[in-house]
Amino acid sequence: MLHSCNGAAYMCSLLHVLHMKRRISVAKKTHTSQIEIIPCKICGDKSSGIHYGVITCEGCKGFFRRSQQSNAAYSCPRQKNCLIDRTSRNRCQHCRLQKCLAVGMSRDAVKFGRMSKKQRDSLYAEVQKHRLQQQQRDHQQQPGEAEPLTPSYGLSANGLTELHDDLSGYMDGHTPDGSKPDSAVSSFYLDIQPSPDQSGLDINGIKPEPICDFAPGSGFFPYCSFTNGETSPTVSMAELEHLAQNISKSHMETCQYLREELQQMTWQAFLQEEVESYQSKPREVMWQLCAIKITEAIQYVVEFAKRIDGFMELCQNDQIVLLKAGSLEVVFVRMCRAFDSQNNTVYFDGKYAGPDVFKSLGCDDLISSVFEFGKNLCSMHLSEDEIALFSAFVLMSADRSWLQEKVKVEKLQQKIQLALQHVLQKNHREDGILTKLICKVSTLRALCSRHTEKLTAFKAIYPDIVRAHFPPLYKELFGSDFEQSMPVDG
């Protein structure tokens, strides 16, 4: 009862703080929006204001804060001159921190926060410069001409429009009203709050997908053998080679970390006191952290999907259905790259973590199954090409519910399977490995189903936490009931 009262009191306090912040944020909104026209000085992403003395995005702000709190000593696996931009910023913590320091980020900027007149004038001039550049770009665009698609996520108004901008903010974004978290609140709830929900990921009518267990040989998967260099009558060897190269390239360009970097960091495991720190986190805080990390990984999966030949030719509904149903499955497949089977640890939040790190989630059975899957997939010693093609195969599953052009998706998946088989044979892999991989699909679906069950149970206990603090994309992908769906015209 006491715990219940304390929880209710805390929630009342939290709601009061959020209410006050909303009132204050109205006055600040115009000033903040002017600054946000200047991109992040570290990675070039959309900025959210001045943090530690420099205009940065929420992601780089959070990274710098964590680096200062832990007094981290990062190392660069290359020549200490890594390019830091939106897509590569997570690959080298050393070079990212050095760039933060080089442009002037400092904890002292928080203590001595007010700008001098010279600094304000300089900032105003820069805002004006970027505003002029924006006006020139708008002027150059012909009337009636569609906005150009960004290199990532821009589809159409009701599909995945502006997903790129939102995904980049989901990991370290704003509170729902656009204001910054109060310090008292952020010390309890991670100050990595979600951005306003603008992803446009239209999931009206898309229901949670039932588990479809199937056996290899049920007829769904077209097992095709190569005879005298010949393949399916409709797919040439050259086409398969091109598709395999396209998918492998897309995979390498959209991995959060290079495999070599991950291997060099395997010795960086959490110390016992760090493990105990994670275990002592409130359940809801640990859930939020994991939701953020999953969402961060999913942004790379979305980018991966968009670069696969044939994906953008699918109708918008089917693109969304495939991503909604398969993105977490691909995250689990990619996890094997960051898994150390010798120590039974996985790369998480800057170091390698064992199952005990996740104890406060209250999902020991799910965590155990995830680690078991990672260990089993690691034991297959898949190359990057093989991981890439298997990831694409998993994502383009033609048996998903609610597909509108199922035959078109099935043809694409069949091509990907042929390309996977081609690469496996080229790599002289043992007989039966393709069958073993395909059998992993049912395991993946069982894992994702269990994740949804755990999330549903958590949401039943902490509905306000999920609604207010979980990334919008995470909620859209894993539970359409979290928010009311937008009405459909007509």
Image (spheres, rainbow, N blue to C red):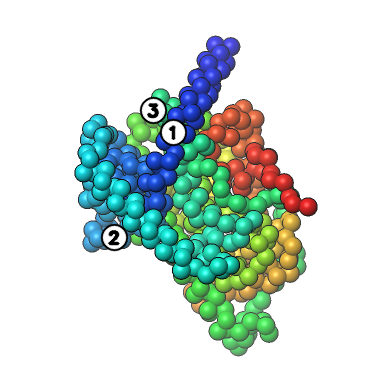
Q: Which residue is mark 3?
A: 183
Q: Which residue is mark 2?
A: 82
Question: Which residue shows up at 65% across the image and 39% down it?
Answer: 483
The residue lying at 74 percent from left, 62 percent from top is 404
In the rendered view, would you say 77 is above or below 13?
below
Q: Amino acid at mark 1?
A: Ala
Alpha carbon distance from label 2 to label 3: 33 Å
The kind of residue tagged 2 is: Cys
Name the element at disc 3: helix
Residue 348: % across, % down: 42, 45
The amino acid type, in three-letter code, at marker 3 is Ser
The label nearer to you, 1 versus 3, is: 1
Among numbered discs 2 and 3, the one appearing first in the sequence: 2
* Residue 450 image offset from top left, x and y in percent: 63, 42
Total labels: the figure holds 3
Residue 462 visible, this angle: yes
Q: Tag 1 or tag 2, which sits nearer the N-term? A: 1
In the rendered view of the protein, which quadrant contains the N terminus?
top right
Element type where label 2 sits in the image: loop
- According to the picture, the residue beneath numbered tag 1 turns out to be 27
